[in-house]
Image (cartoon, helix red, strand yellow):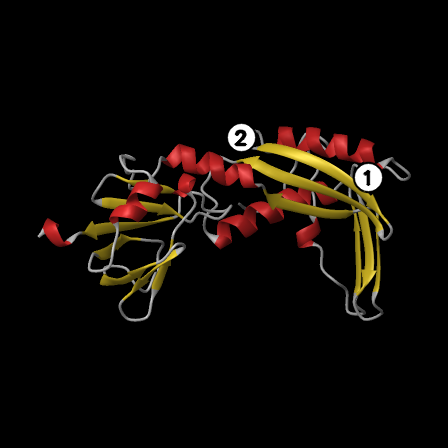
Amino acid sequence: MSNTCLTDALTPGVALRLYSQTPFDELGNFYYQGDPHKPGEALTAIGGRIERHLARHFADFKFAVTTQTFAGGRKITANILDAPSDLTARAAQNAVIEAVRDQMERFGFTHSNILQDYHSCAFFCEARIGQSYWSTLARRRGAKNPVVSRMSLAKFKKGFRAGHAVKLVDAPQGHRSLGTTRRVIKVRSGDIILEGGSYLNFPRAGAFACDGRLVRIAIGPAYDPDAHLLYEWFAPDSG
Protein backbone atom coordinates (compact mmCIF):
# COMPACT_ATOMS: atom_id res chain seq x y z
CA MET A 1 0.00 0.00 0.00
CA SER A 2 1.60 3.25 -1.12
CA ASN A 3 2.05 6.25 1.16
CA THR A 4 2.71 8.79 -1.59
CA CYS A 5 1.31 12.27 -1.09
CA LEU A 6 -2.46 12.18 -1.45
CA THR A 7 -5.62 14.14 -0.90
CA ASP A 8 -8.90 13.16 0.71
CA ALA A 9 -12.22 14.53 1.86
CA LEU A 10 -10.74 16.35 4.86
CA THR A 11 -8.58 18.62 2.70
CA PRO A 12 -9.89 18.48 -0.88
CA GLY A 13 -7.37 19.42 -3.53
CA VAL A 14 -4.48 19.79 -1.07
CA ALA A 15 -1.49 17.45 -1.16
CA LEU A 16 -0.68 15.99 2.26
CA ARG A 17 2.69 15.13 3.73
CA LEU A 18 2.16 12.13 5.94
CA TYR A 19 3.78 11.25 9.26
CA SER A 20 5.94 8.52 7.72
CA GLN A 21 7.15 10.98 5.04
CA THR A 22 8.25 13.62 7.54
CA PRO A 23 12.04 13.70 8.04
CA PHE A 24 14.20 14.73 10.98
CA ASP A 25 16.25 17.85 10.38
CA GLU A 26 20.06 18.03 10.68
CA LEU A 27 19.77 18.85 14.41
CA GLY A 28 17.62 15.79 15.19
CA ASN A 29 14.34 17.69 15.40
CA PHE A 30 11.08 16.13 14.24
CA TYR A 31 7.93 18.19 13.83
CA TYR A 32 4.63 16.92 12.53
CA GLN A 33 1.30 18.72 12.78
CA GLY A 34 -1.77 16.89 11.44
CA ASP A 35 -4.18 18.90 9.31
CA PRO A 36 -7.40 17.96 11.23
CA HIS A 37 -5.72 18.30 14.67
CA LYS A 38 -7.75 20.31 17.21
CA PRO A 39 -5.77 21.60 20.24
CA GLY A 40 -7.30 20.60 23.57
CA GLU A 41 -9.70 18.05 22.07
CA ALA A 42 -10.85 15.24 24.40
CA LEU A 43 -9.34 11.84 23.70
CA THR A 44 -12.70 10.12 23.16
CA ALA A 45 -13.65 12.79 20.63
CA ILE A 46 -10.37 12.28 18.76
CA GLY A 47 -10.95 8.54 18.79
CA GLY A 48 -14.42 8.96 17.35
CA ARG A 49 -13.18 11.22 14.56
CA ILE A 50 -10.37 8.81 13.74
CA GLU A 51 -12.75 5.84 13.58
CA ARG A 52 -15.07 7.67 11.19
CA HIS A 53 -12.17 8.84 9.06
CA LEU A 54 -10.63 5.36 8.79
CA ALA A 55 -14.00 3.94 7.75
CA ARG A 56 -14.15 6.48 4.91
CA HIS A 57 -10.51 6.39 3.89
CA PHE A 58 -10.17 2.58 3.92
CA ALA A 59 -13.67 1.72 2.72
CA ASP A 60 -13.01 -2.02 2.33
CA PHE A 61 -11.55 -2.41 5.82
CA LYS A 62 -13.20 -2.86 9.21
CA PHE A 63 -11.76 -1.20 12.33
CA ALA A 64 -12.31 -1.01 16.05
CA VAL A 65 -10.74 2.07 17.63
CA THR A 66 -10.03 2.21 21.38
CA THR A 67 -8.67 4.96 23.61
CA GLN A 68 -6.61 4.69 26.78
CA THR A 69 -5.37 7.18 29.37
CA PHE A 70 -2.43 6.26 31.61
CA ALA A 71 0.20 7.95 33.77
CA GLY A 72 2.55 8.61 30.84
CA GLY A 73 -0.01 10.07 28.48
CA ARG A 74 -2.83 9.04 26.15
CA LYS A 75 -3.08 6.34 23.49
CA ILE A 76 -5.37 5.53 20.57
CA THR A 77 -5.29 2.05 19.02
CA ALA A 78 -6.86 1.04 15.72
CA ASN A 79 -7.47 -2.70 15.47
CA ILE A 80 -7.81 -3.95 11.89
CA LEU A 81 -10.68 -6.46 11.99
CA ASP A 82 -10.87 -7.21 8.27
CA ALA A 83 -9.09 -6.20 5.08
CA PRO A 84 -9.53 -7.14 1.43
CA SER A 85 -5.92 -8.27 1.00
CA ASP A 86 -3.91 -11.17 2.38
CA LEU A 87 -1.65 -9.77 5.11
CA THR A 88 0.22 -12.99 5.85
CA ALA A 89 3.52 -11.64 4.49
CA ARG A 90 5.38 -9.35 6.87
CA ALA A 91 5.88 -6.71 4.16
CA ALA A 92 2.12 -6.55 3.53
CA GLN A 93 1.44 -6.19 7.27
CA ASN A 94 3.99 -3.39 7.64
CA ALA A 95 2.61 -1.49 4.63
CA VAL A 96 -0.98 -1.57 5.91
CA ILE A 97 0.00 -0.69 9.48
CA GLU A 98 2.04 2.27 8.25
CA ALA A 99 -0.78 3.50 6.00
CA VAL A 100 -3.36 3.29 8.81
CA ARG A 101 -1.07 4.93 11.35
CA ASP A 102 -0.33 7.77 8.92
CA GLN A 103 -4.04 8.56 8.80
CA MET A 104 -4.35 8.39 12.60
CA GLU A 105 -1.34 10.67 13.16
CA ARG A 106 -3.07 13.38 11.13
CA PHE A 107 -5.36 14.01 14.12
CA GLY A 108 -2.49 14.89 16.45
CA PHE A 109 0.99 16.37 16.57
CA THR A 110 4.46 15.11 17.42
CA HIS A 111 7.44 17.25 18.43
CA SER A 112 10.65 15.40 19.29
CA ASN A 113 14.43 15.46 19.18
CA ILE A 114 16.31 12.18 19.04
CA LEU A 115 19.56 13.79 20.18
CA GLN A 116 18.03 15.34 23.31
CA ASP A 117 15.72 12.43 24.19
CA TYR A 118 12.72 14.74 23.92
CA HIS A 119 9.25 13.68 22.78
CA SER A 120 5.89 15.43 22.99
CA CYS A 121 2.71 14.34 21.23
CA ALA A 122 -1.05 14.74 21.38
CA PHE A 123 -1.43 10.97 21.89
CA PHE A 124 0.49 7.77 21.32
CA CYS A 125 -0.73 5.98 18.25
CA GLU A 126 -0.86 2.28 17.36
CA ALA A 127 -2.32 0.39 14.42
CA ARG A 128 -2.38 -3.37 14.67
CA ILE A 129 -3.93 -6.39 12.99
CA GLY A 130 -6.59 -7.85 15.28
CA GLN A 131 -7.02 -11.56 15.89
CA SER A 132 -10.42 -11.48 14.19
CA TYR A 133 -8.69 -10.56 10.91
CA TRP A 134 -6.84 -13.89 10.94
CA SER A 135 -9.98 -15.84 11.79
CA THR A 136 -11.87 -14.14 8.96
CA LEU A 137 -9.01 -14.83 6.54
CA ALA A 138 -8.98 -18.51 7.53
CA ARG A 139 -12.73 -18.80 6.90
CA ARG A 140 -12.31 -17.06 3.55
CA ARG A 141 -9.55 -19.44 2.49
CA GLY A 142 -11.27 -22.54 3.83
CA ALA A 143 -9.57 -25.19 5.96
CA LYS A 144 -6.64 -27.03 4.41
CA ASN A 145 -6.50 -30.82 4.74
CA PRO A 146 -9.90 -31.27 6.43
CA VAL A 147 -10.22 -34.60 8.24
CA VAL A 148 -13.60 -36.10 9.11
CA SER A 149 -13.59 -36.83 12.83
CA ARG A 150 -14.60 -40.50 13.15
CA MET A 151 -12.50 -41.28 16.20
CA SER A 152 -12.38 -39.37 19.47
CA LEU A 153 -9.07 -38.43 21.07
CA ALA A 154 -9.78 -40.83 23.96
CA LYS A 155 -10.39 -43.72 21.56
CA PHE A 156 -7.29 -42.83 19.58
CA LYS A 157 -5.16 -42.94 22.74
CA LYS A 158 -6.46 -46.41 23.53
CA GLY A 159 -5.80 -47.73 20.02
CA PHE A 160 -2.42 -46.06 19.46
CA ARG A 161 0.49 -48.08 20.83
CA ALA A 162 4.17 -48.94 20.60
CA GLY A 163 5.06 -50.51 17.26
CA HIS A 164 2.74 -48.25 15.28
CA ALA A 165 4.21 -45.51 13.09
CA VAL A 166 3.28 -42.02 11.97
CA LYS A 167 4.29 -40.06 8.88
CA LEU A 168 4.11 -36.28 8.90
CA VAL A 169 2.52 -35.54 5.50
CA ASP A 170 1.81 -31.82 5.93
CA ALA A 171 2.88 -29.09 8.32
CA PRO A 172 3.65 -25.35 8.37
CA GLN A 173 6.40 -24.37 5.96
CA GLY A 174 9.90 -25.18 7.19
CA HIS A 175 8.93 -27.99 9.58
CA ARG A 176 12.04 -30.18 9.81
CA SER A 177 10.14 -33.48 10.12
CA LEU A 178 7.89 -33.04 7.07
CA GLY A 179 7.77 -36.31 5.09
CA THR A 180 9.42 -38.31 7.87
CA THR A 181 7.98 -41.64 9.12
CA ARG A 182 8.80 -42.55 12.71
CA ARG A 183 7.98 -45.65 14.73
CA VAL A 184 6.25 -45.25 18.09
CA ILE A 185 8.44 -46.28 21.02
CA LYS A 186 6.08 -45.54 23.89
CA VAL A 187 2.66 -44.00 24.50
CA ARG A 188 2.27 -42.03 27.73
CA SER A 189 -0.67 -40.19 29.21
CA GLY A 190 0.31 -36.83 27.73
CA ASP A 191 2.57 -37.61 24.80
CA ILE A 192 4.05 -40.17 22.41
CA ILE A 193 7.76 -41.05 22.32
CA LEU A 194 8.96 -41.59 18.76
CA GLU A 195 12.18 -43.14 17.50
CA GLY A 196 15.06 -40.76 17.15
CA GLY A 197 14.35 -39.14 20.51
CA SER A 198 11.44 -37.00 19.29
CA TYR A 199 8.00 -36.88 20.85
CA LEU A 200 4.49 -35.73 20.03
CA ASN A 201 2.22 -34.11 22.61
CA PHE A 202 -1.43 -35.11 22.63
CA PRO A 203 -3.51 -32.02 21.78
CA ARG A 204 -6.73 -30.78 23.31
CA ALA A 205 -9.77 -32.68 22.08
CA GLY A 206 -10.96 -29.63 20.12
CA ALA A 207 -7.67 -29.51 18.20
CA PHE A 208 -7.79 -33.19 17.17
CA ALA A 209 -9.47 -35.00 14.30
CA CYS A 210 -8.91 -38.57 13.10
CA ASP A 211 -10.71 -40.60 10.44
CA GLY A 212 -8.91 -43.83 11.30
CA ARG A 213 -5.95 -43.21 8.98
CA LEU A 214 -5.24 -39.46 8.92
CA VAL A 215 -4.67 -37.48 12.12
CA ARG A 216 -5.01 -33.68 12.05
CA ILE A 217 -3.70 -31.67 15.02
CA ALA A 218 -4.43 -27.93 15.05
CA ILE A 219 -1.53 -25.79 16.26
CA GLY A 220 -2.65 -22.44 14.84
CA PRO A 221 -1.58 -19.24 16.61
CA ALA A 222 -3.66 -16.08 16.38
CA TYR A 223 -2.03 -14.98 13.10
CA ASP A 224 -2.45 -18.38 11.39
CA PRO A 225 -5.46 -20.16 12.92
CA ASP A 226 -5.52 -22.93 10.27
CA ALA A 227 -1.93 -24.05 10.97
CA HIS A 228 -1.85 -27.78 11.70
CA LEU A 229 0.09 -31.03 11.59
CA LEU A 230 -1.28 -33.82 9.38
CA TYR A 231 -0.08 -37.35 10.13
CA GLU A 232 -0.73 -40.67 8.43
CA TRP A 233 -1.14 -43.42 11.00
CA PHE A 234 0.24 -46.89 10.30
CA ALA A 235 -0.87 -49.74 12.58
CA PRO A 236 0.94 -53.12 12.29
CA ASP A 237 -2.04 -54.73 10.53
CA SER A 238 -2.38 -51.90 7.97
CA GLY A 239 0.42 -53.29 5.78
23 or 129, nearer to the observer: 129
Circle on res. 231: none
195 or 175, nearer to the observer: 195
Q: Is residue 192 left or right of residue 125?
A: left
- Which amino acid type is shown beneath numbered disc 1? His
Specify the farthest residue to the right: 40
> Dot 2: within a 10 Å radius of its alpha carbon, few (fewer than 14), some, or many (20 or more) residues?
few
> Dot 1: within a 10 Å radius of its alpha carbon, few (fewer than 14), some, or many (20 or more) residues?
some
- Which amino acid type is shown beneath numbered disc 2? Asp
Circle on res. 60: 2
Residue at the location (20% across, 56% down)?
164
204 or 94, nearer to the observer: 204
Q: Is residue 79 left or right of residue 1?
A: right
Q: Is residue 108 left or right of residue 177?
A: right
Q: Is residue 115 something that shows in the picture?
A: yes
Residue at the location (41% across, 33% down)?
139
Mark 1 vs 2: CB contact within 8 A: no
- Count the marks: how many? 2
Circle on res. 37: 1
Residue 3 percent coordinates (x, y): 59, 47
Residue 181, located in which quarter of the rendered image? bottom left
Q: Is residue 12 something that shows in the picture?
A: no
230 or 190, nearer to the observer: 190
Measure the C-alpha gap from mark 1 to mark 2.
25 Å
Q: Is residue 16 left or right of residue 167?
A: right
Classify mark 2: helix, strand or loop: loop
Residue 83 percent coordinates (x, y): 52, 36
Q: Nearer the viewer, mark 1 or mark 2?
A: 2
Residue 37 percent coordinates (x, y): 82, 39
Classify mark 1: helix, strand or loop: loop
Residue 112 percent coordinates (x, y): 82, 60
